[in-house]
Image (cartoon, rainbow, N blue to C red):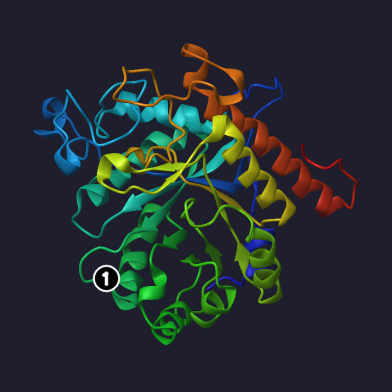
């Protein structure tokens, strides 16, 4: 496995044609990734409503989300939808699409090459979010990594990694070369014991950013990459979960980005582009009646102007974060982020 320090040095910034809202030339950085879900389907393309109809929802009248997508109920197999989504991500200065993956033969596995093809013209890298598919073990993940490397995947984020013994992960990671596995934990000691290259937090309900500094300081001491996860909020009431982290008109998102920057995160991961079930998405959302929430009020924006508010804000924070990374590298002094 690549050493964490070598992995950090290898992070690069690639220029593409997207233009962020502040008018500067866009830079996509492998230091910023976003969790992406390719699991949605429609009858016209996929034979049924996939995921939109979970937890008793009845598409198209109702969907399994507290929000409604601005592009409507879509299929993740639609090339035009994927192109538009990749354009969104690139315009927000995000360099890595971390694709939810549920094991060999799953719908997400079958769609992964299509996502890779859609990402490539925008200069986006693709990583894999290894979900807790049935029968998953560290040994099966090792086999998954060996297969997915042939698709050009080099980074793997292992959700729920702490469900398997550290020694089992350590044995697997010791024999992996040229790839990086990230543990889903806020405990750097546990990630180090498992031989992981780094860690990420993912859960933006449990982790509000207040622990990022402590986590990243400890991670660096153990030669781990620290990739804490920022997000706009959490609302999965449509899935029967009563817990809520309010978006607070964008203040929640701002606060988490500030925390990641103050922690000098090696990388920032964003939860999420389009996890509509849990209400963590920053994909454009529209007003759709009293049944659904919208982004209205975020940073003082309403209606059409608010639909892309979180993507635009991501571009702004990505620029601040990358400037901070550059200042740390060169020793230049930068004003504190506001």
Image point (58%, 56%), residue name:
228
Q: Is residue 225 above or below residue 323?
A: below
**Residue 211 in which image quadrant:** bottom right
Q: Is residue 186 above or below residue 318?
A: below
Residue 125 lies, in percent from the top left, at: 49, 45
**Vertical order, 149 against 319 (above or below):** below
- Residue at image position (52%, 82%) is 193
> How many circles with numbers are drawn on the protein?
1
Q: Residue at x 62, y 69 (%)?
A: 4
- x and y, in percent, of residue 252 in the image: 58, 40
| Residue 277 seen in the current view | yes
Location of the C terminus by quadrant is top right
Q: Nearer the viewer, residue 77 or 10?
A: 77
Local crowd at mark 1 within 10 Å, few (<14), some, or many (≥20)? some
Q: Under tag 1, what secondary structure?
A: loop
Q: Residue furthest front?
A: 242
Q: Is residue 325 left or right of residue 219?
A: right
- Residue 87 in percent (x, y) is at 47, 27
Q: Could you tell whether 279 is left or right of 10 in the image? A: left
Residue 150 pos. (x, y %): 36, 58
Can you identify the residue that label 1 sits on? 136
- The answer to which of 300 and 4 lies nearer the viewer is 300
């Amino acid at each position: 496995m690549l050493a964490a320090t070598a992995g950090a040095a290898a992070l690069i910034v690639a220029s593409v044609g997207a233009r962020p809202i502040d008018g500067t030339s866009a830079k996509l950085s492998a230091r910023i990734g976003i969790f992406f879900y390719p699991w949605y389907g429609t009858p016209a393309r996929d034979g049924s409503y996939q995921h939109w109809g979970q937890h008793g929802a009845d598409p198209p009248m109702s969907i399994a989300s507290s929000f409604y997508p601005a592009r409507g109920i879509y299929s993740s197999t639609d090339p035009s939808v994927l192109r538009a989504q990749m354009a969104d991500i690139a315009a927000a200065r995000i360099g890595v699409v971390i694709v939810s993956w549920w094991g060999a033969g799953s719908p997400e596995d079958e769609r992964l090459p299509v996502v890779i093809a859609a990402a490539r013209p925008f200069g986006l890298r693709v990583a894999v979010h290894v979900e807790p598919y049935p029968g998953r073990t560290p040994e099966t993940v090792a086999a998954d990594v060996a297969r997915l490397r042939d698709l050009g995947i080099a980074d793997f984020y292992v959700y729920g990694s702490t469900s398997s013994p550290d020694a089992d992960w350590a044995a697997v990671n010791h024999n992996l070369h040229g790839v990086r596995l990230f543990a889903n934990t806020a405990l750097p000691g546990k990630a180090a014991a498992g031989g992981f290259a780094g860690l990420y937090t993912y859960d933006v309900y449990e982790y509000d950013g207040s622990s990022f500094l402590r986590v990243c300081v400890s991670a660096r001491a153990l030669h781990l990459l620290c990739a804490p996860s920022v997000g706009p909020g959490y609302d999965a009431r449509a899935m029967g979960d009563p817990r809520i982290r309010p978006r607070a008109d964008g203040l929640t998102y701002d606060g988490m980005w500030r925390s990641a920057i103050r922690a000098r995160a090696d990388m920032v991961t964003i939860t999420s582009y389009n996890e509509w079930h849990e209400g963590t998405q920053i994909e454009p959302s529209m007003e759709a009646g009293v049944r659904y929430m919208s982004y209205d009020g975020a940073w003082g924006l309403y209606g059409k102007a608010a639909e892309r508010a979180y993507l635009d804000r991501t571009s702004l924070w990505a620029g601040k974060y990358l400037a901070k990374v550059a200042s740390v590298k060169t020793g230049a002094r930068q004003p504190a982020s506001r």
